[in-house]
Image (spheres, grey):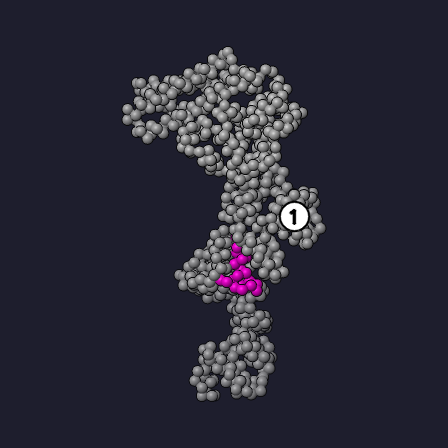
Amino acid sequence: METNIVTREDLNYLAQQSAGSLNMILSGMTALLNDTDNKVAMLESQNWFQRMCRTISGKNKMTQQEIQQNHDKINLYVSQAMTELFEQQCIDRQIMMSLGNQLNELYAEHLQLKQMLGAFVSKLNEKIESIDNFHMLNTEIEQGVYSSCSPIVGICKILAQMDKRCIQDYRKMNILQRSMASQGILNDTQTTLADYLMSIAQISVEDAGAIYIELSSIRGNFMANIILRMIENYHFLPDMARKLKNKQALVESVIANEQLEPSITLSIKDVYDDLVNSKLDMIEGLVPISAIQYDAKMQEAERLYLEGKTDDAFELFKTLAEKGNGRAMYFMGEYYTHGYGHIAKDSAQAEEWRIKGRDAGDILATLNVAYSLPKDSEERNTIFANIFESVKNLAESGDIIAQNELADLYISGYGCERNDTEALRWLKSSAEGGYWRSMAKLGDIYLNKENYSEAFKWYKKAANLNYGYAQGWTGNLLDWKGDLPKDYFEANEWYHKAAEQDVDFALYNLGCNYCDGKGCEIDYHKAFDLFKKSAELGYNFAQGQVGNLLDWKGNLPKDYYEANKWYKKAADQGVDWAMSNLAINYVSGKGCPVDYAKAATLFEKAANLGNAYAANELGKLYRSGSGVTQDYQEALRWFEKAANGGNGDAACSIGYFYFKGLGVEIDDKKNFYWTKKAAELGDGMGMSNLGLCYYVARGTPCDYEAAKYWWKKAAELGIQDAKNDLWNHFGIRA
């Protein structure tokens, strides 16, 4: 019962708070409702009611009549109560009408019982003559008694006459099922849920009562519940039916209120099996679990999932998982593992749902539990070996989710021989069946093979199904990766879509484009927000870029202390340039105390990761003895590493070492070699020194034109020594 409906407790409270005639009226209503409840309970305790095999007669019939009389009195009391409340200015007209409707709903259950009992009186008197009704029921079915009504009505009428002894007897139930099939009551014809509901709207009041009393005893059943809602709305709430004007509107209303998918297809046979199972569960005192409910809801959830409506699907998966559906538990594990839609990654939650799914017997959940176990563990290998055939069988049945998982097994060689050909075949089957994860995996495979057009095709297919990872890679291929024509505007559109799902690398790339003005106007504030969000998701390069924008890049207010915090986060995740930038701040004392030793440590880490700039700066520290013991040979080693990595300043320093004999013998030829390398790498001082080498014939023959050429280039870069040499030796002002 809804919380906005007036309860007996509410009525008692009103009675206690009222006086005079209103008190009497409300007290009378309460008493009548209680009396009606007692009589209903007495009826339900009778054997005829439980087994549906005795006629209503004698005392029982009198009890039914008393219920009718009570309802007549309640109707009178309601009218009087409303009038009294209104006249005493306790309620206005609108509230009065609302309260009246709520009171109607309060005793609607009893009104329905009256109608249901009346519907059964004639049928029970005519039909029920035997305590064991199986033979009578089978005879009626074979004689076509139930063939004239709709299949769902026929099924419910038959179910109503199945007592405990019958429904628990496998052979009797098989006989009845065959008889029903021969009469066309049971069949496997697929019909939509909307069509089922429309058939319910067509039945008579008498049949509605028969169906309702039967299905009311089957609690927690998906099909039973929606049929009950149809009957309630159309037959027991005629005002509602009139408001809806037509049966089609009624069907649409029920579908909307129950949040159903009207295109779900079922067969009468499935409905029958589901209702029988639920009835048996109730008889045995078990908690009923409706297979059709699960199947229908899972169909809908997986449909939404495969259409890329991952947030909508998640809510359904969550509901089903909480009710014990193992397949739904598998998907919950997938959501928390990969972070689909707006669901944040949560490894603990993922593991919990995978284990629950395994315990519920789901194959794919069990498979994913194995992935989480230590590699080469006996338990892990055993699970993979035992489950491979099950996954393969599921894949071969057409399950595209299982096909994706089977492909992973072939790729990894878990539970089988590694087979890239089979992996690709199953991935394509899954992708062509509509699974966006398989599409994206195909994109990854073709990307690694540098087949960028094929990679782009599959990424974009998955991107169009709202897969954030694929949207990010579609942007990458249009932005900077591969040999496809670049389209920065479209790339940014895909980045934006992926960013809405918190895809870390897409947030980062979009931030970079706002910094550089690629496909958009330069906007450092937008870039910062994107970098910050990506950084908070743990993306290392974004953490470094947050530091850059707070340190030196762009037009944001500078915060060197905060910048260093982000540099450290990125450095701890192996970003070499973040290590280098943090080291620079330790050298200069920006946002931190000057600490050459820490700077040297960071420069060395970055240099060992291939950062030429860091190697050059570390060489400078060894040259000067800042934070380390002064060592020209060690400095030279790091300068050479930097120069070989393309750093012109380091090459210039090496030339100077050979010119001055710092840690090495003076060697003009080596000086010329490294100085020329520095100049060719674009170093201004290297250009200036190379001009001098040509002018004075140091390590090379004299060449005034070459000297003039390199001094001019150095002067263009602002090197004052080169400007002076041009004026002093050639009379050229630069």
Q: In which quarter of the image is the C terminus?
A: bottom left
Q: How many marks?
A: 1
Q: Is residue 352 magenta?
A: no
The structure residue drawn at horizontal position 36% and vertical position 20%, both measured from the top left corner, is 77
Query: Residue 562 location in percent, x, y?
Result: 44, 58
The structure residue drawn at horizontal position 43% and vertical position 31%, both measured from the top left corner, is 241
In the picture shown, does residue 245 fall above or below 640?
above
Dot 1 crowding, Cα within 10 Å, few <14, some 14–19, many 20+: many
Front in this rendered view, residue 389 or 573 = 389
Query: Residue 294 location in percent, x, y?
Result: 56, 36
Helix, strand or loop for the magenta stretch, by majority: helix
What kind of residue is marked 1? Leu
Query: Residue 264 location in percent, x, y?
Result: 54, 39
Q: In the orientation shown, which residue stands out farthest toward the top?
A: 58
Query: Residue 697 location in percent, x, y?
Result: 56, 86
- List the residue tagged with mark 1: 406
In the picture shown, does residue 575 fall above or below 85?
below
Locate residue 559 relative to residue 132 in the image: left or right: left
Q: Quadrant of the N terminus?
A: top left
Q: What element carries label 1?
A: helix
Residue 174: tell me if it is visible.
Answer: yes
Locate residue 704 relative to residue 18 in the image: left or right: right
The structure residue drawn at horizontal position 54% and vertical position 16%, both measured from the top left corner, is 125
Front in this rendered view, residue 290 or 599 = 290
In the picture shown, does residue 632 fall above or below 91?
below
The structure residue drawn at horizontal position 63% and vertical position 47%, both measured from the top left corner, is 403
Q: Is residue 475 magenta?
A: yes
In the picture shown, does residue 154 fall above or below 420?
above
Residue 470: tell me if it is visible.
Answer: no
Front in this rendered view, residue 561 or 612 = 612
Please provide the residue range marked out in magenta. 468-488
